[in-house]
C-alpha cells in the first residue's frame, strides 16, 4: 500500500512555492519535494501542519492507495 497525496495540487491552488510551504511548516523545500513526489511519508505532525496551512482536511490531503498493493 502507498500513501497518495494531493499536496502539490493544493499548494498550486494557493499559488505557493515549495520553499514557501516548507517555511510555513518548518521543513526544507527538499522535504516538500519528497512529500509531493511520494518518496517521503510525513509524520502525523507534519501532515497536520500541511493540512492546516493548505486549508484542507487531513483526509483530503492523504489517502491510502489500495491499488498500489495489488
Image (tube, grey):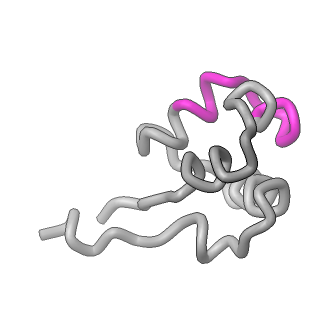
Q: Is residue 25 magenta?
A: yes
Locate the C terminus and report the quarter of the image it occupies. bottom left
For the record, the magenta segment spans 22-33
Q: Residue furthest left?
A: 70
Q: Residue placed at 22% from the left, 63% from the top? A: 68
- Compared with 69, 24 (above or below) is above
Residue 20's place in the image compared with 42, above or below, is above
Q: Considering depth in this image, is 64 or 6 the residue closer to the camera?
A: 6
Where is residue 59 shown, x and y percent of the image? 61, 76
Left or right relative to 65: residue 15: right
Asked if 1 appears above or below 40 in the picture, the reply is below
Q: Is residue 9 shown in magenta?
A: no
Q: Quadrant of residue 47?
A: bottom right
* 70 left or right of 39 in image: left
Q: Residue at x 74, y 38 (%)?
A: 16
In the image, taking residue 55 as reference, residue 1 lies left or right, namely left
Q: Where's residue 37, x and y in %?
A: 43, 39
Q: Is residue 20 above or below residue 14?
A: above
x 74%, y 25%: residue: 19
Quarter occupied by the N terminus: bottom left
- Residue 27 screen position, x and y as percent: 77, 31
Amino acid at each position: 500500500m502507498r500513501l497518495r497525496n494531493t499536496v502539490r495540487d493544493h499548494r498550486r491552488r494557493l499559488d505557493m512555492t515549495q520553499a514557501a510551504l516548507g517555511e510555513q511548516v518548518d521543513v526544507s523545500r527538499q522535504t516538500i519535494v519528497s512529500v509531493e513526489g511520494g518518496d517521503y511519508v510525513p509524520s502525523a505532525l507534519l501532515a497536520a501542519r500541511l493540512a492546516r496551512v493548505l486549508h484542507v482536511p487531513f483526509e483530503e490531503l492523504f489517502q491510502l492507495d489500495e491499488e498500489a498493493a495489488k
